[in-house]
């Protein structure tokens, strides 16, 4: 029994060693990275910022409303008190003047006092109406801003779900469909255009991919991924000089692309050139 157990343990150790060697061999022979980074973290950060901004705006509106209500109440009380005091002084002064100059007609006194009170009241009402109109206008602008922020958050949620769908889809056609839906919502989204160009290139449509990258660079001529994807399209179309030029521009904007050249099969032919080798070695030097 002991010999059988010893034989079994020996066999298990040999089998595990063979599996480990096969796994190491597979890892050494990998030609592409096991994953492709996407922009989920960037989108989630943008979404969080929009939500925080919307929440802060709501808090500011509520605080502003409460403050304005208190200010209005205080001003109404102050104006009412001032108006009553002013009317009292006006009546007293007018009565004294009338007595002095000999106006004995109570009817004339009442009419003049009523006219002065009406004039003062109308002036106060008009002033408050102007202030309230301005306050309502400010509230309308705030409400419009809150509505726009809510729409932007909803749009960001939709776009985020489309990016997730594209990242999980393993077929180029499925990715292209997701990118097209993103571009329907945001036609100038250079990131979606560049990733669509990459998916189109996987279908063997190099000219289509080239047109898409040109479109992306018209929108943003400093977007490094668009230069990198266009370099891949040029390489497939055997335009080596254009491909190398775009690789240099892409690495100038983002040096991380120098480590990606050897992993993309589109660059297999030009990767042997001296200029391309110098670009690849830039990452190691840094």
Image (cartoon, rainbow, N blue to C red):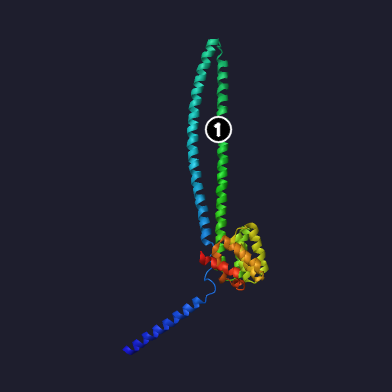
Q: Is residue 112 above or below residue 239?
A: above
Mark 1 = which residue?
Answer: 128
Exactly how many numbered labels are in the figure? Answer: 1
Look at the picture and state if 143 lies above or below 98. Answer: below
Look at the image and tell me whether residue 1 can be seen: no
Q: Residue 38's spot in the image, x, y percent?
A: 54, 64
* Front residue of 217 and 64: 217
Extreme residue toward the left, this view: 2
Q: Is residue 50 left or right of residue 194?
A: left
Identify the residue at image location x=68%, y=68%: 207
Residue found 52% across the figure and 59% down from its top: 42
Does the rendering let one see residue 75? yes
Q: In the figure, residue 181 lies in which quadrant? A: bottom right
Q: Residues within 10 Å of mark 1 (few under 14, many from 20)?
A: some
Q: Nearer the viewer, residue 254 or 164?
A: 254
Residue at image location 56% in from the left, 22% down from the top: 116
Q: Nearer the viewer, residue 98 or 57?
A: 57
Could you tell me residue 269's position as x and y percent? 62, 73
**Residue situated in front as seen by the camera: 30 or 156:** 30
- Is 62 drawn above or below residue 111 in the view shown? below
- Percent across and percent down for residue 247 are 60, 65
* Helix, strand or loop at mark 1: helix
> As drawn, is 218 to the left or to the right of 138?
right
Position of residue 80 measured from the top left corner of the image (x, y, whole percent): 50, 28
Quadrant in the picture for residue 169:
bottom right
* Quadrant that contains the N terminus: bottom left
């Amino acid at each position: 029994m002991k010999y059988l157990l010893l034989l079994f343990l020996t066999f298990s150790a040999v089998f595990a060693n063979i599996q480990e060697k096969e796994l190491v061999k597979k890892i050494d022979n990998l030609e592409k990275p096991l994953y492709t980074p996407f922009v989920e973290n960037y989108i989630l950060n943008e979404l969080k910022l929009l939500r925080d901004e919307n929440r802060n705006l709501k808090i500011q509106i509520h605080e502003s409303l409460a403050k304005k209500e208190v200010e209005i109440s205080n001003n109404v009380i102050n104006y009412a008190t001032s108006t009553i005091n002013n009317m009292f002084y006006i009546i007293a002064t007018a009565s004294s003047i009338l007595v002095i100059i000999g106006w004995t007609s109570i009817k004339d006194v009442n009419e003049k006092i009523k006219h002065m009170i009406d004039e003062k009241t109308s002036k106060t009402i008009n002033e408050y109406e102007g202030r309230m109109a301005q306050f309502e206008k400010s509230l309308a602008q705030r409400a419009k801003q809150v509505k726009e922020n809510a729409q932007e958050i909803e749009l960001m949620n939709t776009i985020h779900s489309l990016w997730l769908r594209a990242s999980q889809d393993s077929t180029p056609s499925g990715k292209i469909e997701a990118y097209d839906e993103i571009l329907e919502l945001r036609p100038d989204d250079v990131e979606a255009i560049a990733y669509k160009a990459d998916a189109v290139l996987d279908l063997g449509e190099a000219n289509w991919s080239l047109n898409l990258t040109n479109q992306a660079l018209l929108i943003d001529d400093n977007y490094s991924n668009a230069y990198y994807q266009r370099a891949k399209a040029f390489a497939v179309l055997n335009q080596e000089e254009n491909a190398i030029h775009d690789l240099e521009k892409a690495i100038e904007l983002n040096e991380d692309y120098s480590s990606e050249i050897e992993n993309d099969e589109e660059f297999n032919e030009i990767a042997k050139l001296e200029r391309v080798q110098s670009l690849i070695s830039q990452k190691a030097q840094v």
